Amino acid sequence: MSAVAPSSSPSVPNSTPDIARRLVAEALGTALLVAIVVGSGIRAERLAAGDTALALLCNALATGAGLVALLVSLGPVSGGHFNPVVSLSNLIQGRLSPREAAGYVLVQLIGATLGVMAAHAMFGLPALSLSTQARTGVPMWWSECLASFGLIGLGIATGRSRPGLLPFVVAGYITAGYWFTSSTSFANPALTLACALTDTFTGIRMMDVPAFVLAQIFGAMNATLLFHWLCPPLSTGPAPMSRRSWKGRAGLTSAD
């Protein structure tokens, strides 16, 4: 999710990293996120000795902790999307150009694939292996729609009111989503595709991926439209008198 932070350097006010740095940050962040999800799933399954609930708990906690770390560290560089539906939401809100959004999605998909390979390498598994785990049906599709709706909606609401808390809100919601959804809350097309490339605890059959992705996009887009209206961008405050004489009102800004 987006976790844009203001620059900490007073000598470079409102500086924005160039597109190359943002794309590298998105690729790296997505790769590390997938490595955390897949790797912790493998580790948890091996240690839980058949206790699926315990394995899921370990997987959820590792994912939540890793997500906070990634959003806090890389969020100020790229916005900390690591998720195509987040980038699509930002495109709709006018915070990314179509070219930037396409670049974000491309590097997220590449990073996700590399993340699977990195996790497999840590546990001595083949670089890639197609999953055989079935995840399909209306309940799971609805779970992905709702999980993505909440992720985007809470991200917009928090980003526009308490942006400093955004990494913790996003990570907390995703951790909870492991348990309140029947699908374990992928809520991320890049992660979903990556999990089709691992025949481990977090896997999903490739044939089940398209329905998951469509449900995620549907939920995310509806959340964007609703929360953009529900939590409008805050105004920048009263403009100086000279500016008012030209503009008539202060401009709007979005911090989510």
Image (cartoon, rainbow, N blue to C red):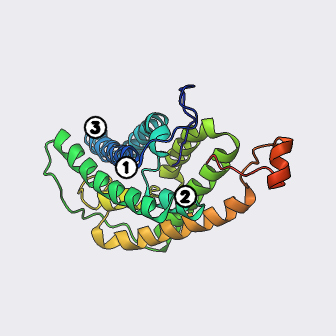
Mark 2 and mark 1 in contact (Cβ < 8 Å)? no
Which residue sits at x=68%, y=49%?
253
Mark 1 lies on a secondary structure that is helix
Which residue sits at x=30%, y=47%?
38
Mark 2 lies on a secondary structure that is helix
The answer to whether residue 183 is visible is: no
Which residue sits at x=24%, y=56%?
198
Local packing at callout 1 (Cα closer than 10 Å; few below 14, some 14-19, many 20+) is many
Question: Residue 47 has which mark?
Answer: 3
In-front residue for pair 6/181: 6
Mark 2 or 3 closer to N-term?
A: 3
In-front residue for pair 216/61: 216
Mark 3 and mark 2 in contact (Cβ < 8 Å)? no
Above or below 156: residue 211: below
* Amino acid type indicated by mark 3: Leu
- Residue 203, how many percent across, how many down? 30, 58
* Amino acid type indicated by mark 2: Asn
The residue identified by callout 1 is 23
Mark 3 and mark 1 in contact (Cβ < 8 Å)? no
In-front residue for pair 198/240: 240
In front: label 2 or label 3: 2
Mark 3 lies on a secondary structure that is helix
The residue identified by callout 2 is 90
In front: label 1 or label 3: 1
